[in-house]
Image (spheres, rainbow, N blue to C red):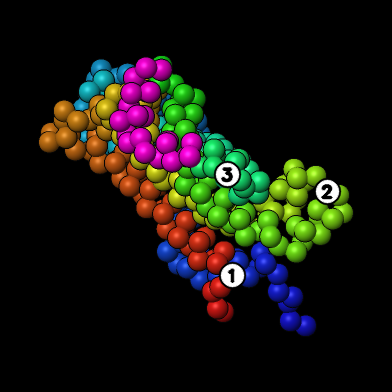
Amino acid sequence: MPRKSSLYRDTWRRFARDRLAIGGLIILLTLGLAAGSAPLLARFAPNQVDLRKLDAAPSRAHWFGTDDLGRDEFSRALYAGRVSLSIGVLSAAVAAVAGTTVGSSAGYYGGGVDSVLMRATDVVLSIPPLPLVIVLSAIAKPSPLILILIIAGIGWMGTARLVRSAFLTIREGEYVEAARAMGCSNLRIILRHALPNSLGPVIVAATLAVGNAIITESVLSFLGVGVQPPTASWGNMLQHAESTMATNPWLSIFPGLFILLSALSVNALGDGLRDALDVRMKE
């Protein structure tokens, strides 16, 4: 008997046909597993100093070489991945929740609620994001938690607009009217009926936001207002390597490569999810 079709199976089938998206997913999973397994894979502690191995080139003992303090770059890159990827994923998740809350409230209730929330969104959108993040990071102690909140604070507006647009259509649907006629509360209608039908754009926006958050964290750390040493992130590893890029290129190549791979992989994954979740695509 032929297998029954379902939304999830059809979505996965469309996604699996996108080789670029599958490649991005594999790379992201590999980076995530490697970073998560850092205590098992790293031969040295990330801040272990070896004065006999200063600025050593890549070798069998030190795959990515060592820095000017003799610290193993492979170990630092693994532990830095835990910080950079965590900040990217968590800040995107916080931004998605905040944007979904604002967008669903504005789209469902409309009227004055919509006007107030969307004008507030426009105000935040009008502020240049990078200077704002730099100022906030310079004022607040730039711990990973603070960075997550700051990056999420400038990244929720796009999701809010997407969800609002979807809710403006969804709230007029027959199943929403039927739920109202049955006496369901507004909160129940939003959570149980309207929100599940707008998750596609939210998932895509949140996925793409991960790449933007990783790059933002890297830029802030490179500028010295992000994750502070001795905690390693890919951004501050690049900052530490800035003065020796000509003589010790391996110090900048590997963290830069990880930032590039993670950003490109997230974008490929987001594009694949957007196409897979588009119900208008033809088989």
Mark toward the start of the polypeptide (2 vs 1): 2
Classify residue 8 as left or right of residue 58. Answer: right
The amino acid type of the residue labelled 1 equals Val
Residue with the mark numbered 1: 279
Quadrant where the image shows the C terminus: bottom right
Front-lying residue, 162 or 221? 162
Q: Judge left or right: residue 270 versus residue 188.
A: left
Of badges 2 and 1, nearer the viewer stands 2
Q: Residue furthest right?
A: 182
Q: Amino acid at mark 3?
A: Asp
Q: Amino acid at mark 2?
A: Cys
Q: Under tag 1, what secondary structure?
A: loop
Residue at x 60%, y 40% (from the top left corner)? 113
Residue at coordinates 25% horizontally, 17% vertically from top-left? 51
Classed neighbour count for the residue bearing mark 1: other residues with Cα under 10 Å, few (<14), some (14–19), many (≥20):
few
Q: Position of residue 122 (x, y in %)?
A: 43, 41
The image quadrant of residue 93 is top right
Determine the residue positioned at 27% across, 27% down.
223
Which range of residues does the magenta coloring cover? 119-140
Question: What main secondary structure does the magenta stretch of the protein show?
Answer: helix
The mark found on residue 240 in the picture is none
Crowding around mark 3 (Cα neighbors within 10 Å: few <14, some 14 to 19, many 20+) is some
Marks 2/3: CA–CA distance: 22 Å
